[in-house]
Amino acid sequence: MATSTKPRWGLDDALRRARTANRLANKYSVQVEPRLSAGQLPQLQADRVTLGDAAARGATALGQQKTGTSKERATSAQGHAFVMSIRNAVARTSRPPAALRTAIGIGDGLKAEDTQGVVAALRAIADHGVALAQCGVVPDDVTAASALAAELLGADGTQGTLIDARAEHTEDRVDTQLRVEGAVDEISARGALAFYQDPVIAERFRRLVAVGGPTADDEADAGPEPTPPPVGGSAS
């Protein structure tokens, strides 16, 4: 079987198949375990715990990323509105210097979604505070522009960190799930081989990797959970 770099089952489905595989292999350990790779069952138990934790961490990471995105968008919208107000004040000032209009970006089509563009526009306002005074821009406005630029940069940086963290989490989760799927494949094939003379049990092992996965009867017949490996012990 070719090695895949993408899980073929959903996370919950992979955990269900792995749980049943682990329990079946434990129930029939005398016949099955000698055929498995060394340390396969304790490794599978450890990976199941890791994968279950990954599901919870993934939901948390996604929630944090959504919160970060919401904060960045709100700050960018606030900064954009401020920039447009400053630009409007300049545009409606009698004969404002053309260089000033250009410097603060009047007419550039700036969108609130363009975080870096909004930051640049806010910085331009802060850099041209003296010239903007003739357009009704007071020192507090210049200070506010600097503060909004800094806040927006912080929100953008936090969002980038959250995206990177979620990507790293996803990569780790995929690696673990691929290892779990490989263990289920091995248990399925070798368990079916061990019971080739008992079609009922052999089919229970085969269904571990079938399209629909193990049935409710398979799960009920699989027996109890194996004893967890010792804390701090090797799972490899």
Image (cartoon, rainbow, N blue to C red):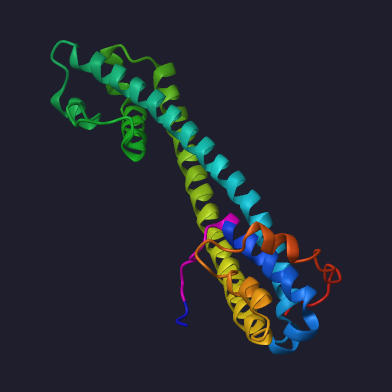
Q: Residue furthest bottom?
A: 34
Which one is in front, 133 or 156? 156
Which one is in front, 52 or 73? 52
Q: Quadrant of residue 156?
A: top left
Q: Quadrant of residue 168?
A: bottom right
Which one is in front, 184 or 189? 189
Q: Is residue 135 above or below residue 167?
A: above
Q: Is residue 213 above or below residue 86?
A: below
Q: Is residue 161 left or right of residue 90?
A: right
Residue 183 position, x and y percent, is 63, 76
Identified at 59% across, 50% down, the residue is 58
Q: Is residue 30 above or below residue 4?
A: below
Residue 230 position, x and y percent, is 86, 71
Residue 101 position, x and y percent, is 19, 25
- Main SS of residues in magenta: loop
Residue 108 highlighted magenta (yes or no): no
Residue 92 position, x and y percent, is 19, 11
Extent of the magenta region = 4-12
Identified at 31% across, 27% down, the residue is 128
Which one is in front, 159 or 22? 22
Q: Quadrant of the C terminus?
A: bottom right
Q: Is residue 222 left or right of residue 14?
A: right
Identified at 15% across, 10% down, the residue is 94
Q: Is residue 172 left or right of residue 191?
A: left
Identified at 64% across, 74% down, the residue is 205
